[in-house]
Image (cartoon, grey):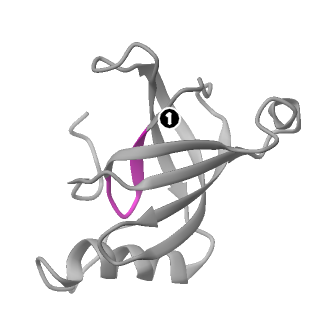
Amino acid sequence: MDNRKDKRFLERNTVFIKSTSEAQEALYRHGINAHTHDISLSGARICTPHFFPVGSVVRIVIDLERTHQSVKVDGEVKWTRKSEEDDDLFESGVEFLHSISQTLLSLIKHLYAEKNGVPSVVSH
């Protein structure tokens, strides 16, 4: 768990997830409500009542609570496990597939601007 590229922030943000897979589209057509457990510039640990297999690409909208911004980004599920805190939830590690620089900029502002100052170097 410690071979992460970017600093993780323990934050609970509301998340809306839809699968980009046609096979799973029928199951998750309307999307799933979830929340982040932690988040960084490159990904998030997301808690959800549904299992997403490793390798799945999901479309997510994260409502960043502190800055009141919404971030839309696709992500690849890197791992999934049952939650240790709640048997009805799964935790999934999602690596963001940043395709829009505005998404990355919004996350930088949200995660660093108020608490730590904007970093001069950002790994990706």
Which quarter of the figure has residue 91?
Answer: top left
Write the start and end of the magenta stretch as one range.
Answer: 39-46
Q: Main secondary structure of the magenta part?
A: strand
Q: x, y percentage for residue 45? A: 38, 41
Seen from the viewer's position, the closer of residues 25 and 78 is: 25
Which quarter of the figure has residue 86?
Answer: top left
Q: Please give left or right for residue 27 compared with residue 17 in the image.
A: right
In the rendered structure, which amino acid carries the disc numbered 1?
A: Lys
Residue found 41% across the figure and 58% down from its top: 42
As drawn, 21 above or below 51: below
Seen from the viewer's position, the closer of residues 81 and 1 is: 81
Residue found 59% across the figure and 63% down from its top: 73
| Quadrant holding the N terminus | top left
Q: x, y percentage for residue 76? A: 58, 44
- The extreme top residue here reads 87
Name the residue beneath numbered marker 1. 78
Q: Please give left or right for residue 107 compared with residue 79 in the image.
A: left
Residue found 59% across the figure and 26% down from its top: 50
Indicate whether residue 89 is drawn in magenta.
no
Which quarter of the figure has residue 24?
Answer: top right
**SS for tag 1?**
strand
As drawn, 81 above or below 41: above
